[in-house]
Amino acid sequence: MIQDKPFPRLYGYQAGSALAADNGAASFSERDLYPKLMQFLSGDLKLYCLRIDEKRSKNNRGAKGSQWLHPDIVAMQAMGRQWHADVRQCVKSGSGQNVALWSFEVKPVLNGANVRESFFQAVSNSG
């Protein structure tokens, strides 16, 4: 599932064996979703992905402070891949950007109880 507008975009993953029946709770962790998301991003969207491990970040903001420092996954999209050589040269000469940067915050469950915090965490981490 992909929600394109309004920004930020919302991507959803649902597999028959991945979701538990009790109360709609996910039977997988956030870490279980990282490889699945990276596979989708690199395969379907042709993005170059990198996982950022928040445990390696230096943090002086107290418990769980590093969860607000970085997005879970960042990606780069090479914009000029299908561009004609003349267009690529023009963009290069004009010091234009020919890449787009993406950031992703992964949540196994997004519901009314955590949607506000998750939204602000995603916005905070993408800056």
Image: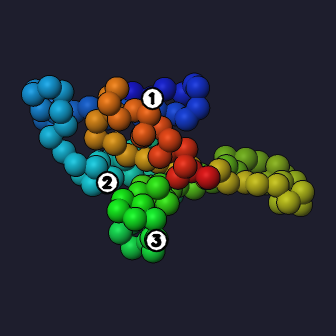
The three-letter code of the residue at mark 1 reads: Ile
Q: Is residue 49 visible?
A: no
Marks 2 and 1, how far apart in space? Answer: 18 Å
Q: Nearer the viewer, residue 53 or 65?
A: 65
- Where's residue 14, x and y in %? 26, 32
Residue at 28% across, 36% down: 109
The three-letter code of the residue at mark 3 reads: Asn
Residue at 87% across, 54% down: 90
Q: Along the polypeptide, which appears first: circle 2 or circle 1?
A: 1
Marks 1 and 3, how far apart in space? Answer: 36 Å
Q: Is residue 81 left or right of residue 14?
A: right
Say which of marks 2 and 3 sits in front.
3
- Where's residue 13, x and y in %? 31, 35
Rendering quarter of residue 25? top left
Q: Which mark is residue 88?
A: none
Q: Nearer the viewer, residue 23 or 102?
A: 23
| Label 2 with label 1: CB-CB less than 8 Å | no
Task: Decide: few, some or many residues near mark 2? Use Cα within 10 Å; few <14, some 14-19, many ≥20.
Answer: few
The residue at which mark 2 appears reads as 35
Residue at 9% across, 28% down: 22
Q: Along the polypeptide, which appears first: circle 2 or circle 3?
A: 2
Q: Along the polypeptide, which appears first: circle 1 or circle 3?
A: 1
Task: Decide: few, some or many residues near mark 3? Use Cα within 10 Å; few <14, some 14-19, many ≥20.
Answer: few
The residue at which mark 3 appears reads as 60
